[in-house]
Amino acid sequence: MSRFSEETFDNWRKPASETEEQRISNAIKMIKDAIKASEELKDKDIEIFVQGSYANNTNVRANSDVDVCIMLKDTFYSEYPDGLTREHYGFIKGTNNFSTFRKKVIRALIDKYGEDNVKQGNKSIKISSTSYRVEADAVPSFQYRNYKYINSKDPDKYVEGIKFFAQTDEEIINYPKIHIENGRNKNEQTHRRFKRLVRIFKRIRYKMIDDGENVNTGITSFLLECLLWNVPNSIYNDYDTWTERMKQVIRFIYDKTKTEKTCKEWREVSEILYLFHSGRKWNCQMVNDFMVQLWKYLEF
């Protein structure tokens, strides 16, 4: 018999409460207002959008933070097909500097929230929570144009991502908008079961940690969402209960992560970046071990 009932799994599939949703919306609006009010940034071409679990509708915990991307488009980074350079597209070297842009964003947020409520993290700028808003991670970034992925020679046709630098000088490139779109598509194809099952997995991971289980820190919420992304739609659609879907998903991921060969082509939800590559916090053996740990914890 399973450690948790079908009723519990059905409850865990649900998104954050309406009260939490309002606090998240308040945090997003305040960041937008802060950037708009900045004298240093008001003339810049900046797009502000939500990324991460809130944007993907897979956030599960009360007081969860929200990731807000502050993307500069006046200057962008780019990747071109082999043999081509920015000159082939009619581009010139940008005049904005990422470090300077980040500092301006920090000043704008301090003007809005006060210095005590704004802290610099390695990758994001952390804004503290109140009863009115949730904690927020603001991520200054430059637009990233990937022409190489679609072999485009047209300056207006590219795959859009973001690029920024951590305080440790690590270069980060990802594709949050495509992640959101692909997640929505898979959710529709699985009768909304994809995101519901992601929420269940996330809640179980938190419950394991709360219960004192030694969950590897490399098993992140982002990783869980990407793992479930690589599960065939048929597993979501061919079974009638959350309990049985859970079992089938764990079996599938366990079988595929026994060796690198059978999961090396797995990708993030964006489908652009490989899920298992050097430099990750995780690897396929870690995932395989977690599937065993998860199966035992759930008493399947």
Image (cartoon, helix red, strand yellow):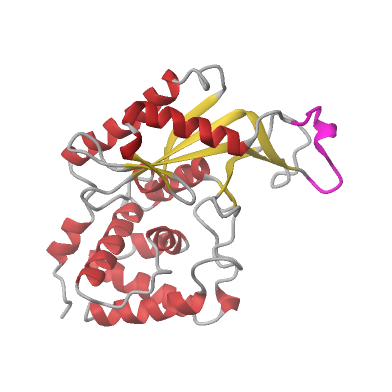
Q: Is residue 143 visible?
A: no
Q: In the shown orientation, is residue 162 left or right of residue 126? A: right
Which is nearer the eye, 104 or 191? 104
Dominant secondary structure, magenta: loop
Percent position of residue 113, x then y = 32, 31
Which is nearer the eye, 153 or 105? 105
Percent position of residue 168, x then y = 56, 55
Q: Quadrant of residue 141?
A: top right
The residue depicted at 25 percent of the width and 61 percent of the height is 203
Start-end of magenta stretch: 81-93
Among all residues in the image, which is located at the extreme front?
A: 115
Asked whether residue 196 is drawn in magenta, I would say no
Q: Is residue 13 above or below residue 299?
A: above
Q: In the shown orientation, is residue 236 left or right of residue 95? A: left
Q: Quadrant of residue 84?
A: top right
Asked whether residue 83 is drawn in magenta, I would say yes
Q: In the shown orientation, is residue 204 left or right of residue 67? A: left
- Which quadrant holds the N terminus? bottom left
Percent position of residue 37, x then y = 42, 18
The residue depicted at 38 percent of the width and 77 percent of the height is 290
Q: Is residue 170 above or below residue 283?
A: above
Percent position of residue 246, x then y = 29, 69
Q: Is residue 268 visible?
A: yes
